[in-house]
Image (spheres, rainbow, N blue to C red):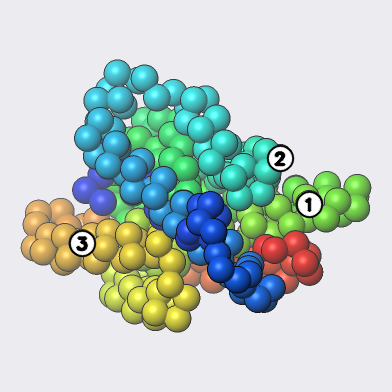
């Protein structure tokens, strides 16, 4: 996932008491304890996200302008946040995979002559990159969008190869997470990369993506999916209202061969990521 700070839309992975010290009259059944721990962890992550979101809304622009929050500093904070989920090495590995993903966007933007900043990490939300202007058209935007999952998938494949060579269940499981995150980013909803890629095919695909994401939220509730749904819905509405603006039709004018390349790259990458997840699933790892 990536966020372009100057774009009217993005780069990029927002969000009990069983552990609060309350005394219980009787112990819970053993099969309920993992569920209670997961709920407690979910509430804790949600609280962190709400606090971080409120802070960024109030001071985010100022911090970015003053460059108080550096890339290295945001990486350290994210490592610490992800360490709460799986330990320090997990935090380091996950942030590294996200960094590789985001650098795919940065490289693609700079190749097009669009100035782009280094990634700024946001715990539990991935990272964002800043750019001064939009790509020239939807075809170029699709190139930038797919560059992140492509490079990110290669990064996960390298982790998988190292894990297989050293028989490391941890690294193989980490590669699984990397494949999953890049596949998730291919969901055809803005601000995810998939939403920006399918704009070169047909903007109406965003409706399909929003419907699928809504169904997923109903079946498997998550504190992050509603935020993506809200941003995606607002972006779809914004672009629909702008359809009559000067230059709008030119921006989305894509040739047949360009549309074919985007479709093959998008669907092919998604299929490879599914295969990668299947091959790197480690039973009992929790991933």
Give me the residue at 39% from left, 50% from top: 47
> Label 1's element?
helix
User: Which mark is first along the chain, 3 or 2?
Assistant: 2
**Identity of the residue drawn at 37% across and 69% down:** 201
Q: Is residue 180 visible?
A: yes
- Circle 2 sits in a helix, a strand or a loop, which is it? helix
Q: Which residue does the image show at 58% across and 37% down from the upper left?
A: 79
Going by the picture, which residue comes out furthest to the front? Answer: 25
Residue that badge 1 annotates: 170
State whether residue 31 is above or below residue 178.
below
The residue tagged 2 is 89
**SS label for mark 3:** helix
- Spatial CA span between label 1 and label 2: 9 Å
Q: Which residue is mark 3?
A: 234
Q: Is residue 92 above or below residue 185?
A: above
Which disc, if any, is residue 49? Answer: none
Residue at x 47% of width, y 75% of height = 220
In percent of width and height, residue 18 lies at: 54, 60
Q: Position of residue 115 (x, y in %)?
A: 36, 30
């Amino acid at each position: 996932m990536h966020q372009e700070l100057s774009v009217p839309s993005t780069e990029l992975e927002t969000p009990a008491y069983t552990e609060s010290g309350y005394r219980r009259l009787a112990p819970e059944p053993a099969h309920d304890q993992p569920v209670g721990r997961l709920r407690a962890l979910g509430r804790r992550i949600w609280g962190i996200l709400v606090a971080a979101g409120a802070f960024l809304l109030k001071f985010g622009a100022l911090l970015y302008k003053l460059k108080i929050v550096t890339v290295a500093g945001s990486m350290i904070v994210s490592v610490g946040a992800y360490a709460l989920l799986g330990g320090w090495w997990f935090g380091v590995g996950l942030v590294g995979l996200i960094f590789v993903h985001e650098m795919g966007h940065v490289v693609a933007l700079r190749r097009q002559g669009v100035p782009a900043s280094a990634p700024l990490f946001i715990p539990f939300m991935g990272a964002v990159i800043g750019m001064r202007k939009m790509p020239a058209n939807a075809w170029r935007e699709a190139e930038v969008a797919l560059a992140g999952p492509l490079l990110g998938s290669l990064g996960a494949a390298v982790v998988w190869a190292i894990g297989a060579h050293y028989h490391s269940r941890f690294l193989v499981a980490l590669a699984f997470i990397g494949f999953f995150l890049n596949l998730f980013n291919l969901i055809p909803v803005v601000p995810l990369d998939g939403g920006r890629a399918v704009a070169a095919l047909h903007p109406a695909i965003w409706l399909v993506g929003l419907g699928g994401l809504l169904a997923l939220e109903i079946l498997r509730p998550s504190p992050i999916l509603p935020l993506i749904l809200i941003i995606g819905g607002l972006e779809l509405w914004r672009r629909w209202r702008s359809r009559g603006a000067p230059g709008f039709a030119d921006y989305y004018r894509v040739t047949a061969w360009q549309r074919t390349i985007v479709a093959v790259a998008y669907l092919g990458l998604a299929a490879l990521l599914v295969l990668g997840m299947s091959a790197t699933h480690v039973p009992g790892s929790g991933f």
